[in-house]
Amino acid sequence: LEFWDGDPEAEACPEVDRLALYLAGELRKGNASWWAAVIRMYPKAEDTRSSHPAYRPASIRIPEQRDFWHGVRERLRRCHAAYAARVGEGAVSFEEAFYASVHIHTHSSTIDGHVVEEPVTNLCNGAPVGGNNVIWLVEPQSG
């Protein structure tokens, strides 16, 4: 992503946070995004905010969720600050970036150390990485 070039603080941000900032920018573009066909499959931001554990008050989350999402939010906050300072007025908001981060953490996998977005996982997963609550069973048809 071109806004990271040469900024050591920004380049120190984990790939998942850089991807969240990129995805937030694409979400903002809507149908103008090259990724529009995939983005249209995403849950609406307001639906996610009203039901996802990442948006629940810390006092009612189970400890593992509370700690996980607090860590995600704080790490992304630091990366967003470096990104916003570099990009300026056109930068996505922290809340846009956090929504994208929540989406990535609950709808992606890591392959060879890189975060990979998987559109099929948009169907119903609501758990953070490592806690996938959707199990796909593929059985050959008998015939």
Image (tube, rainbow, N blue to C red):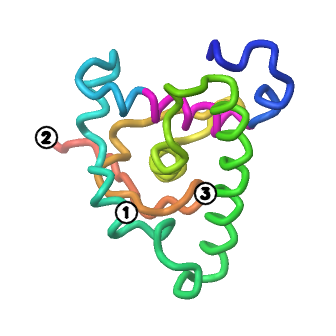
| Disc 1/disc 3 C-alpha distance (Å) | 21 Å
Query: What amino acid is at disc 3?
Result: Gly
Taking the magenta stretch, the answer to whether it contains residue 110 is: no
| Disc 3/disc 2 C-alpha distance (Å) | 36 Å
Disc 2 packing (10 Å; few <14; some 14–19; many ≥20):
few
What is the x, y in percent for residue 112? 69, 29
For marks 2 and 1, the one nearer the N-term is 1
Give the residue pinned by disc 3: 130
> Quadrant of the image for the N terminus?
top right
What element does badge 2 sit on? loop
The answer to whether the residues at label 3 and label 2 have Cβ atoms under 8 Å apart is no
Query: What amino acid is at disc 1?
Result: Arg
Taking the magenta stretch, the answer to whether it contains residue 19 is: yes
**In the displayed image of the protein, which residue is found farthest to the left?**
143
Give the residue pinned by disc 2: 143
Residue 27's place in the image compared with 44, above or below, is: above
Of the two numbered discs 2 and 1 in the rendering, the one whose residue sits closer to the viewer: 1
Give the residue pinned by disc 1: 49
Predominant SS along the magenta part: helix
Near-viewer residue (44 or 127)? 44
What is the x, y in percent for residue 95? 49, 50
Question: In which quadrant of the rendered view does residue 120 lie?
Answer: top left
The span picked out in magenta is 14-25
What element does badge 1 sit on? helix
Residue positioned 13% across, 40% down in the render: 143
Near-viewer residue (32 or 15)? 32
